Image (cartoon, helix red, strand yellow):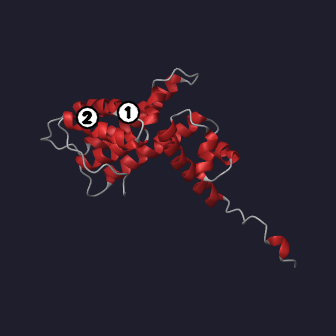
Amino acid sequence: MEQSGQEGRRPANDGPKAAARNRAALVTAARETFAERGLEAPLSAIARRARVGQGVLYRHFPDRAALVSAVLEENVRQIEQAADAEDATLPGLLGVLTWHLAESAAFIGLLHSDRAVDRSAVRAHSSALSERVQLGLRAHLPQDHPLTADDLELAVAMVSAAVIGPTREERVRRALAAWRLLGVQVGPVLPFGG
């Protein structure tokens, strides 16, 4: 058997394991790239950051809307995991939520865009994701908290509208200032488990 021809070969394809790993890398790369460069960032930049080819990107996400949806879904899933943790508190959950708002600030623009996207579908999906976040927050809202469940929902909407700025640090600063103005205590601004 000839060894010299095998040295330049690519490693064996990991099949389904590689697919799951590639998808997760693409979602992370998309979150970071969109946060840095906005929703119009080239999909090729996301593929490069995830260290996959564009064909792999399109195999998982046929268009930009599918990729955006996957990032939003992952954000909500992490907030739900934080809400389900044994030691979950409202300030801790708001810290996780604020981290996701600052990391995904570019996605807020999607809801207000006039692109040729089915806006009713985007709004319906956004509404469903928002409701899942609200359920997690309401479950940890103390009875003696100054905000009611409806007030908390409005507070989240107000803070998300304030999360603007060219850098993550600026977006976090503005979000924390908005929470402070609303008189709401927020825990460390970190991803769940981070």
Spot occupied by residue 83 in the image (x, y as percentages of width and height): 31, 49
Asked if residue 122 lies left or right of residue 45, the reply is left
Q: Is 134 rendered above or below residue 21?
A: above
Spot occupied by residue 97 in the image (x, y as percentages of width and height): 34, 43
Q: Which residue is mark 1?
A: 164
Q: Secondary structure at mark 2?
A: helix
Point out the image quarter for the C terminus: bottom left
Disc 2 and disc 1 in contact, CB within 8 angstroms? no
Q: Which residue is mark 2?
A: 178
Residue 193: name its quadrant: bottom left
Residue 98: name its quadrant: top left
Spot occupied by residue 153 in the image (x, y as percentages of width and height): 28, 32
**Amino acid type at image mark 2:** Ala
Residue visible at 68% across and 49% down in the picture: 53
Asked if residue 116 lies left or right of residue 107, the reply is right
Asked if residue 188 lies left or right of residue 8, the reply is left
Residue visible at 62% across and 40% down in the picture: 43
Disc sitting over residue 91 in the figure: none
Q: Earlier in the sequence, mark 2 or mark 1?
A: 1
Q: Closer to the camera, 158 or 162?
A: 162
Asked whether residue 174 is in view, the answer is yes
Residue 115: name its quadrant: top right
Q: Secondary structure at mark 1?
A: loop
Asked whether residue 148 is in view, the answer is no
Residue visible at 51% across and 49% down in the picture: 28
Asked if residue 55 lies left or right of residue 125, the reply is right
For the residues marked 2 and 1, what is the alpha-carbon distance in whole angstroms? 12 Å
Return the residue found at the far left: 144
Q: Closer to the camera, 4 or 58?
A: 4
Q: How many marks?
A: 2
Q: Mark 1 packing: few (<14 Cα in 10 Å), some, or many (20+)?
A: many
Return the residue found at the far right: 1
